Amino acid sequence: MFALRADEEPESVARLAAAVAAARQVTWLTVPTLRPGRAEAVVGAAGLELLRRGEWLMTTDLTEHPRHVPAAPYERQVRTDGPVTVVSLRGPCGEVAARGTVAVVGGDAIADRIETDAAHRRRGLGRAVMSALAEAAVSGGARTGLLIASDEGRHLYSSLGWRREADVVIAGRPVAS
């Protein structure tokens, strides 16, 4: 579940947290907010467990996204199925060295699962993946890029012009031991 108006409608976070707490299947509540302490208190009061990792909602104008291509020997593969595009950068032995996904919804594009294999880091592959995702999203009609950045990814995205808009609180039911 996603609390879209946590700061404008704080009671919505309590309602969604109660729904997550009552869900039979594993369900997470994602809360973008400018007031993370308040959101954490509300989800904690509902009995949810916080994911203790800093994450941020970031945005950018995709039409101004910097362009980067992967250096040899990496090859870019782009596969689009409807509104979803998956970009993979393959290494010299055909292995997936880096990848990412973007989904276009109207004028927005949501980037997700951006990752670089540890053996291939520090070679500009994250920049090349983000460039290809932005290009595909703009081709699909998007102008605004959205993503939830981990602490590790935030530095890459910031260097590419993405801006932090809000903190993100993520919580779910405690795992039974």
Image (cartoon, rainbow, N blue to C red):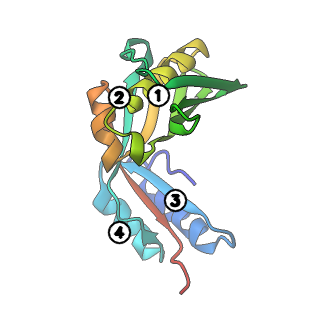
Can residue 97 be seen from the camera position used here? yes
The residue carrying mark 1 is 129
Alpha carbons under labels 2 and 4: distance apart = 39 Å
Q: Between tags 2 and 3, which lies in front?
A: 2
Discs 4/3, front: 3
- Verify CB contact (< 8 Å) between mark 2 and mark 4: no
Q: Report the amino acid beneath label 1.
A: Val
The three-letter amino acid code for the residue at tag 3 is Leu
Give 175 or 68, whichever is nearer the viewer.
68
- Please name the residue that numbered disc 4 is placed on: 41
Between disc 4 and disc 1, whose residue precedes? 4
Disc number placed over residue 29 in the picture, else none:
3
The image quarter in which residue 119 lies: top left
Task: Answer with the quarter of the image where residue 93 lies.
Answer: top right
Residue under circle 2? 124
- Compare residues 29 and 53 and report the one nearer the observer: 53
> Helix, strand or loop at disc 1?
helix
Is residue 12 in view from this perspective? no
Residue at 59 percent of width and 34 percent of height: 94
Give how far across and how far down residue 110 sits, in percent: 53, 33
Counting from the top left corner in percent of width and height, residue 32 is at 41, 48
Q: Considering the numbered disc 4 on the image, is that residue within a helix, a strand or a loop?
A: helix
Residue 137 drawn above or below residue 176 = above
Ranked by sequence position, the earlier of labels 1 and 3 is 3
